[in-house]
Amino acid sequence: MTSPAPSIEDVPLNNFHRLLTARSGGGSFVDGYVLSIIGIAMIQMSASLKLSDFWQGMIAAAALIGVFFGGFLGGWLTDKLGRKKVYFFGPTLFIVCSLAQLWVESVEGLFALRLIIGLAVGIEYPVATSLLVEFLPKKQRGPRLAALTILWFAGAAFAYVVGNAILNVGGDEAWRYVLASASVIGFALLLLRLGTPESPRWLLSKGRDGEADRVIKRVYGNGFSLRNLPEQPDERKMSFKDLLRSGYGKRLFFVSVFWTCSIIPVFAVYAFAPKVLQALNLKGEWAEYGSIAITLLFVIGCILATRLINRIGRRSMLINSFLWSGIALLMLALFSDSNEILVLVLFGAYALFIGGAQVLQLVYPNELFPTEIRAFAVGIGTSLSRIGAAVGTYLVPISLQTLGIANTMYIAAAVTMVGLIAAWAMAPETRSLSLRDAAALTS
């Protein structure tokens, strides 16, 4: 007698899972690219368009503003229209708006294009991660979602390589080609995503059981059916407000707080690493090579966290990440007048330890909510965290000038410790749970 097929969350990783990881991870790569490329083009672009200091700041911030609105919009559209349709919104906007920068002649037009590109980035977070998590085996959920953070850094690094190469050969108007280069990557992502099926979990939540069954058979084989999909059919007709009142509001609060607390110091440090290091008495080559080393340690921290996420668990990783990175920031405040080596060691320790909280930004929101509001919850987390990122980035130079480096580091440490308190009080452990059980309030 043939044994029944296992749950789709217990099957081995297959080629479809690998391809879907590339399809969703490609969105993170493009996000890192388009958000970083503006800094490379800024000097030449400012001279060409005669940008004032005000407009330089506004254009640099335009994408972050767009991400804020895109997170809300993308989450709502993904839960409303389905994952498959919204999966193509981001790449299409990347292509159109990046190409349009070739012919932009006004600062207002450039601001509008960068705003829409940010909107596309915001849409990407909820749709790419929710679609991926709803197909992945449970043992691969954490590592594969965490890997998207690494791909963001890879996209940012690639932007610096490509952008500088174009500037070196492109003449006075090279900045246009630098910004338009994102359209090539966006087009490649669009082609890669062709043929992606709809999430059977989303179809099931909409009562489209037959379509969900056909997707499962297409992906996993004819031996699988809806019987092999653990889901929560009793919640199909619950509204968003009902779900929040039933207890998911607390989880949404937890995700928003920990995500914001983990991203404020990182964005501030990442954006102003040379200025911060200079305030810590690291000048010249110390500041230059220190900035490179810290960037590399951010990536290494995320890679290590990706490798360890199933071994030590989500809750333990988040608590330890906030604890040790917060201590590193506190030590930086206490020893802000110390020698260069100690400052770089402490700064590097922060970059390394915060990797755990960084990768969990995409893991926890996708695991803690049912299919009906998963994408919307990710979108809210994306949007609210970007407010913190924008505020933190804006305030760092002001804080350095008015409060000094020591007090700035104390503030960063305090923000991190708020994240630690939230993690200690509210972070659940979802490591070995099915997606249904992880999203259930009883977990």
Image (cartoon, rainbow, N blue to C red):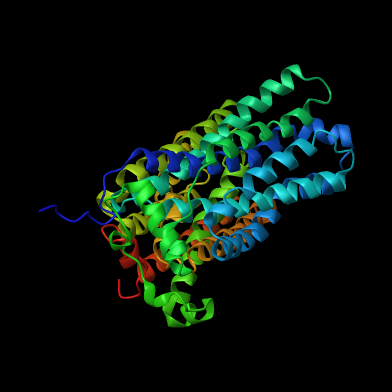
Q: Can residue 346 be seen by looking at this rendering?
A: no
| Numbered circles on residues, count | 0
Where residue 287 appears, as percent x and y from the top left, is 58, 32
Residue 331 vs 236, above or below: the answer is above
Q: Residue furthest top?
A: 169
Query: Closer to the camera, 185 or 418?
Result: 185
Where residue 283 appears, as percent x and y from the top left, is 60, 32
The C terminus appears in which quarter of the rendering?
bottom left
Q: Is residue 356 left or right of residue 339?
A: left
The residue positioned 72% from the left and 18% from the top of the image is: 168
The residue positioned 59% from the left and 43% from the top of the image is: 31
Where residue 413 appears, as percent x and y from the top left, is 49, 57
The residue positioned 70% from the left and 49% from the top of the image is: 63
Query: Closer to the camera, 345 or 98?
Result: 98
Residue 141 vs 285, above or below: the answer is below
Where residue 246 appears, as percent x and y from the top left, is 43, 82
Which quadrant of the structure image shows residue 76? bottom right
The residue positioned 50% from the left and 59% from the top of the image is: 259
Which quadrant of the structure image shows residue 389? bottom right
Which quadrant of the structure image shows residue 363? bottom left
Query: Closer to the camera, 288 or 313?
Result: 313
Q: Is residue 402 left or right of residue 156?
A: right
Query: Closer to the camera, 315 or 329?
Result: 315
Q: Can residue 249 be seen by looking at this rendering?
A: yes
